[in-house]
Image: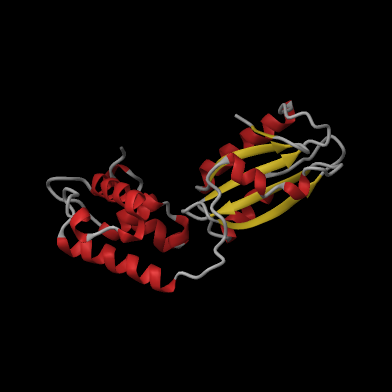
Amino acid sequence: MKRIKDIDKLDRPREKLAKKGASALADLELLQALIGSGTKHADVTKIAKDALKLLQEHGPDVTREQLQSVTGLGNAKITEILASLELSKRYLVDGEQPVIDSSEKAAEQLVDIRGKKQEHFVVMTLDGAHRLIEKRTITIGTLTSNLVHPREVFADAITDRAAFIICAHNHPSGNLTPSKADREIHQRLTKASTIVGIDIIDHLIVARDSHASID
C-alpha cells in the first residue's frame, strides 16, 4: 500500500484534485484528500482505506460510531466526512450516468457498433467513480482495419478530466481474436496512458453477439 509521501507530489490527491478536478480522483483518493494527513498511529492511506471499507459496506448511512472504529480517524474528520455525505444526499440528482465497472457493463454501451461493416474505434471516458462521462467514436476504418493515434484517443479524455478510459472496437468478421495491429495499437495507447496519467482499464473487441478484452 503506497503512502502519500511515496507518491510524486503532483500526483498526490489534493494536488491532483486542484489540477484535474474532483471527478478525476478515485474513491480512495477523495478520502485521502478529505482526511489530509495521518497520525502517529496510522498513515493517511491506511486511514482512508479503512474508512472506504466502511463506506462500501454501509454507503451514505455509515454512522459516527462506525467511523470511530477507524484507527487514526478523529472526531473532526469524522464530522467532515458525515457532513460531506449529507450534502451529497441532499443534492444528488436522478439521471446519473451509468457506472462502468466491468467488461460486461462496458459492452452494454457498445450495441451500436456490434453489427457495423467497418471497424469503429470507440473511447468511453470515466470519472474517478467509474461513472461514464462520454462515449465517442474516434475513428471509422475499413472492412478489416482501423488505424488510431494516441492523440485522438486522449485529447477528449484530457478535456473531460477523465480518470480512466475504456477503448473498444468492433470486428466485422466476428472473430474476437486480437490481430497483430490490435495489440500494437493497444501497446501504444498503454504507453501514452502512462504519460498523460489516464489509465486504460479495458480494451474491448466486440462482435454481433459477444465480446472479449485484449489482455
Nearer the observer, 168 or 95: 95
Q: Position of residue 171 (x, y in %)?
A: 78, 36
| Quadrant of residue 214 within the rendered picture | top right
Kindly identify the residue that appears in the image at 47 percent across and 60 percent down: 23
Q: As displayed, is residue 147 above or below residue 47? A: above
Quadrant in which the N terminus is drawn: top left
Q: Residue at x 21, y 60 (%)?
A: 64
- Compared to residue 207, the image places residue 122 above or below, namely below
- Counting labels gives 0
Residue 55 horizontal/vertical position (percent): 33, 53
Q: How is the image coloured?
A: secondary structure
Q: Residue at x 64, y 35 (%)?
A: 186
Q: Is 166 on the left-hand or right-hand side of 92?
A: right
Position of the C terminus, as image quadrant, is top right
Q: Residue furthest left?
A: 40
| Viewer-proximal residue among 198 and 82 | 82
Residue 102 at x, y percent in the picture: 55, 42
Left or right? Give the position of 78 relative to 21: left
